[in-house]
Amino acid sequence: MRKIPAVIAVLGLAAVTLVGCSTSTSADCPRPTTSDQASMDLITVKGAADEAPEVTVRAPFHTKTTEFSDVEEGDGIAITDGEQLVVLDVTLVNGASGKTLVQTPYDGDLSRVFPLSRWVQTFPGFADALECATEGSRVAIALAPGDVEAQNAANLGLEEGDSAVAVVDLRKVYLPKAEGADQYNDALGMPTVVRAPDGRPGIIVPDATPPTDLVVQTLQKGDGPVVTGDDPVRVHYTGVTWADRKVFDTTWGAEPQSVVLDSMIPGFAEALKGATVGSQVLVVIPPDQGYGDQQQGSIPGDSTLVFVVDILGIDAAPSE
């Protein structure tokens, strides 16, 4: 289990739904650079985007509603889903005093990956303020009373009725689902895939003899980084057996998994190596590249496996 940094543990980071656009491109997810100019003019943010910001608030500062302003606009993946994985740096300032209450480390570590929903549980105002914000952005957020969860607000020294100011740096944003271009494949004798609006795949296995060789089909081709196997890859996947057509494992409905290709069954690893982030891949794995003649949990021996894998991003190694 990944350890949570102490500062994030103090903030008490868990689950709420962010509603918004259905894609992860900033062009299709319009966002104003400032929600309320008058409020945000009372907040000044200086400093390099890769360092902790210098935040000045005209104190005492108070807002009745969540407001935000994009100090820097990134050109990366947009936040469109409350369960999207993100890496954030956050500085929190007391609106009444103008003093900094807490900061994340700002050490460049991109391995501290969490669903946005964990942040939103502590800072409900982040749900609206970060909707459609893009990787690489620095966002100043005016947090109304109630925009910081009550117990955490008290722990941090905020009085009831106090406003706060957060400066959020979006260091990394993962895709919520595969979003590449649809690809043509000859589906004769192969499983077909249908997708729910949230990207969750359904797999229809034909009444046919399974192939004896590994088959890999790219259903959607993304334009992100190439999976080399050198670093862990973050994926959503669903697996069924060809024979009984039952799902034996899926990450959908839970957090996407970080997988190391060398630790996966050979057919799964070969299917992902060379694929690109944003792609969805269908792979049919014969027994000799899967679990062979050994039963694996609910999977009988000599099973042909069918996986649909969405490639959401490449994980970074933890900082030294």
Image (cartoon, grey):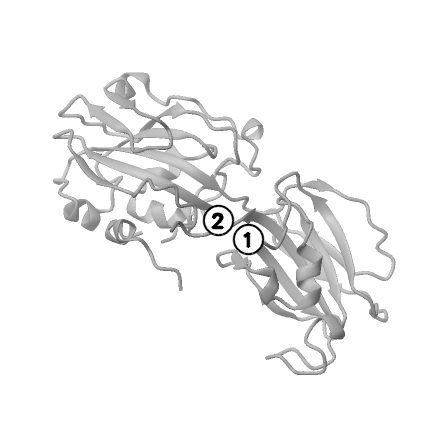
* Residue named by callout 1: 231
Residue 109: assigned label: none
Residue 296 horizontal side relative to residue 206, left or right: left
**Vertical position of residue 112 compared to residue 34: above or below:** below
* First of labels 2, 1 by sequence position: 1
- Secondary element under disc 2, as helix, strand or loop, is loop
Seen from the viewer's position, the closer of residues 263 and 14 is: 263
Task: Give above or below for 251 relative to 178.
Answer: below
Circle number at residue 316: 2
3D distance between C-alphas at marks 2 and 1: 7 Å
215 relative to 26 in the view: left or right: right
Location of residue 56 by image quarter: top left
Q: Secondary structure at mark 1?
A: loop
Q: Is residue 251 left or right of residue 100?
A: right
Residue at x 55% of width, y 47% of height? 313
**Mark 1 residue type:** Asp
From the viewer's perspective, is residue 91 above or below residue 257? above
- Amino acid tagged 2: Ala
Q: Is residue 198 visible?
A: no
Q: Is residue 253 visible?
A: yes
Q: Are marks 2 and 1 in contact (CB under 8 Å)?
A: yes
Residue 294 rendering spot, x and y as whole percentages: 67, 83
